[in-house]
């Protein structure tokens, strides 16, 4: 694996996930304690006016951060801000992206997002990765 | 009125970064990395221990802001912002409280929407801030009207 410090400006690291499953969202509900039924139960999602269950925004945000996990010896995520831009449905195929946009001695700045199979951004934001 | 609660905080609550909860959380976001789970990898790392995923504070309890009532429907999670002074360590105690940072309204395509900025602070046992976690919650017109805010 390349070190983050070796990335060149404009370079993107990415990862494509398995299609979103109901079990993913059941597990996240249990692990996070967010049991809002629009994330797990079809009828409740429909009652809320949705076409079907949707992923927790925080599940998607949590997934996105794993692009940085292997680099724990190089630094840590100091700032992580996300705007929830679109809904994630069952069987969506998500891709995690982080593009290096600024580099200093102290930190690497990334533009991050998650896109679905239609190339639509579902979350977008920034990561400041502080370097040791 | 939500504006009356701007700046009001909850009482601090003690949380523990429990190993098993970290494992479940990491698994649920598909990030079963040994730096979270494997004690040997943790002790050999620069931290000397395991760390927790960046969005893990989501599960912490930080107490209620007395009198502040949020609707249980019609809320949209708009934004989420973390700031860390260092990573969170598995096994440590974290003292959390919440504060209503701001409330404002904006005219949108579906009427006037309310924006609540809630911020949580996570401190170590000596009162040093480890992280802050800010959530921007949007309240839609229909719900906002029914609450009379």
Image (tube, grey):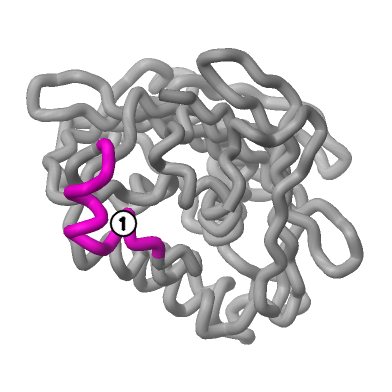
In the rendered image, the vertical position of residue A54 relative to residue A69, given as above or below = below
| Location of mark 1 (residue) | B36
In the rendered image, the vertical position of residue A28 relative to residue B15, given as above or below = below
The picture places residue B107, in percent across and down from the top left corner, at 80, 29
Which element is circle 1 on?
Answer: helix
Give residue B104's quadrant in the image. top right
Q: In which quadrant of the rendered image does the C terminus of chain A lie?
A: top left
**Residue nearest the observer in this picture, B78 or A109:** A109
Instruction: Decide whether residue A12 is among the magenta residues.
Output: no
Q: Which residues are magenta?
A: B33-46
Residue for point 43% across, 76% down? A27
**Residue nearest the observer in this picture, A116 or A16:** A16
Residue for point 75% across, 34% down? B112
Residue for point 55% across, 21% down? A107
In the rendered image, the vertical position of residue A41 relative to residue B120, given as above or below = below
User: Is residue A32 something that shows in the picture?
Assistant: no
The picture places residue B132, in percent across and down from the top left corner, at 38, 28
Instruction: Decide whether residue B40 is among the magenta residues.
Output: yes
**Residue nearest the observer in this picture, B109 or B131:** B131
Residue lying at the far left of the rendered structure? B125
Q: Main secondary structure of the magenta part?
A: helix
**Residue nearest the observer in this picture, B94 or B13:** B94
- Left or right: residue A86 versus residue B114 is right
- Left or right: residue A28 versus residue A128 is left
Q: Residues within 10 Å of mark 1 (few under 14, many from 20)?
A: many
The picture places residue B53, in percent across and down from the top left corner, at 39, 50
Residue for point 79% across, 57% down? A115
């Amino acid at each position: 694996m390349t070190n983050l410090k070796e990335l060149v400006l404009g370079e993107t690291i990415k990862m494509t996930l398995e299609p979103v499953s109901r079990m993913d969202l059941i597990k996240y509900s249990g692990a996070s304690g967010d049991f809002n039924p629009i994330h797990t139960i079809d009828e409740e999602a429909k009652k809320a006016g949705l076409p079907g269950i949707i992923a927790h925004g925080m599940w998607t945000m949590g997934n996105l951060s794993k692009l940085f996990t292997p680099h724990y010896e190089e630094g840590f995520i100091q700032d992580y801000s996300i705007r929830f831009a679109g809904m994630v449905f069952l069987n969506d195929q998500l891709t995690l992206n982080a593009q290096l946009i600024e580099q200093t001695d102290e930190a690497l700045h990334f533009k991050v997002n998650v896109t679905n199979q239609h190339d639509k951004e579902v979350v977008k934001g920034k990561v400041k990765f502080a370097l040791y | 009125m939500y504006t009356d609660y701007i700046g009001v905080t909850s009482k601090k609550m003690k949380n523990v970064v429990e190993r098993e909860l970290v494992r479940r959380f990491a698994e649920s976001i598909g990030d079963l990395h040994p730096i979270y789970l494997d004690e040997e990898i943790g002790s050999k790392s620069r931290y000397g221990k395991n760390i927790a995923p960046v969005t893990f504070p989501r599960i912490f309890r930080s107490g209620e802001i007395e009198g502040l009532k949020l609707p249980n429907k019609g809320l949209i999670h708009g934004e989420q912002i973390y700031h860390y002074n260092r990573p969170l360590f598995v096994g440590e105690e974290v003292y959390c409280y919440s504060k209503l940072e701001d409330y404002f309204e904006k005219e949108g395509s579906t009427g006037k929407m309310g924006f609540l900025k809630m911020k949580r602070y996570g401190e170590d046992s000596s009162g040093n801030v480890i992280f802050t976690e800010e959530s921007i919650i949007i309240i839609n017109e229909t719900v906002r009207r029914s609450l009379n805010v």
